[in-house]
Amino acid sequence: MKITSKGQVTIPQAVREQAGMLPNSEVEFEVRDNGEVVIRLAAPAPVVTLRQAFERVRGSANATVFKGMGTDEFMAFLRG
């Protein structure tokens, strides 16, 4: 198996199936002291409801740093 110029490899289907790697699965890489590379499924992200997501950010736009900012300034800040 070759690594492409972009650093990509194809994980064989049989390996993906055995490991339970589905399309869009998140994986982690570990490089061991002996040079071996281990690829494993990443721990799944906790399931967050839409309500929980809104509760987590509620009021964050009212932070002192945003006081007096116009819409254009705020959007520029968000976009970096």
Image (cartoon, helix red, strand yellow):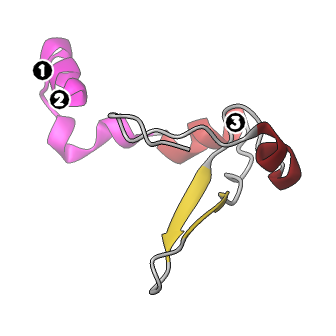
Image point (67%, 52%), residue name: 45
Quadrant that contains the N terminus: top right
Q: Amino acid at mark 3?
A: Arg
Query: Mark 1 to mark 3: distance in Å?
Result: 28 Å
Which element type, helix, strand or loop, lies under badge 2? helix
- Most extreme residue toward the top is 72
Q: Amino acid at mark 1?
A: Glu
Image point (71%, 53%), residue name: 44
Along the polypeptide, which appears first: circle 3 or circle 2?
Answer: 3
Residue 16 vs 79, above or below: the answer is below
Q: Which residue was labeled with disc 2?
A: 77
Which element type, helix, strand or loop, lies under badge 1? helix
- Most extreme residue toward the bottom is 33
Query: Mark 2 to mark 1: distance in Å?
Result: 6 Å
- Would residue 8 be found to the left or right of residue 49 on screen? left
Q: Which residues are magenta?
A: 59-80
Quadrant that contains the C terminus: top left
- Would residue 18 be found to the left or right of residue 41 on screen? right
Residue 29: image x %, image y %?
A: 53, 62
Which element type, helix, strand or loop, lies under badge 3? helix
Q: Which residue was labeled with disc 3?
A: 51
* Main secondary structure found in the magenta portion: helix
Dot 2 crowding, Cα within 10 Å, few <14, some 14–19, many 20+: few
- Would residue 74 be found to the left or right of residue 54 on screen? left
Badge 2 vs badge 1, beta-carbon distance below 8 Å: yes
Image point (69%, 60%), residue name: 43
Q: Amino acid at mark 2?
A: Phe
Residue 5 vs 18, above or below: the answer is above
Q: Which residue was labeled with disc 1?
A: 73
Residue 7: image x %, image y %?
A: 38, 41
Image point (60%, 37%), residue name: 10
Badge 3 vs badge 2, beta-carbon distance below 8 Å: no
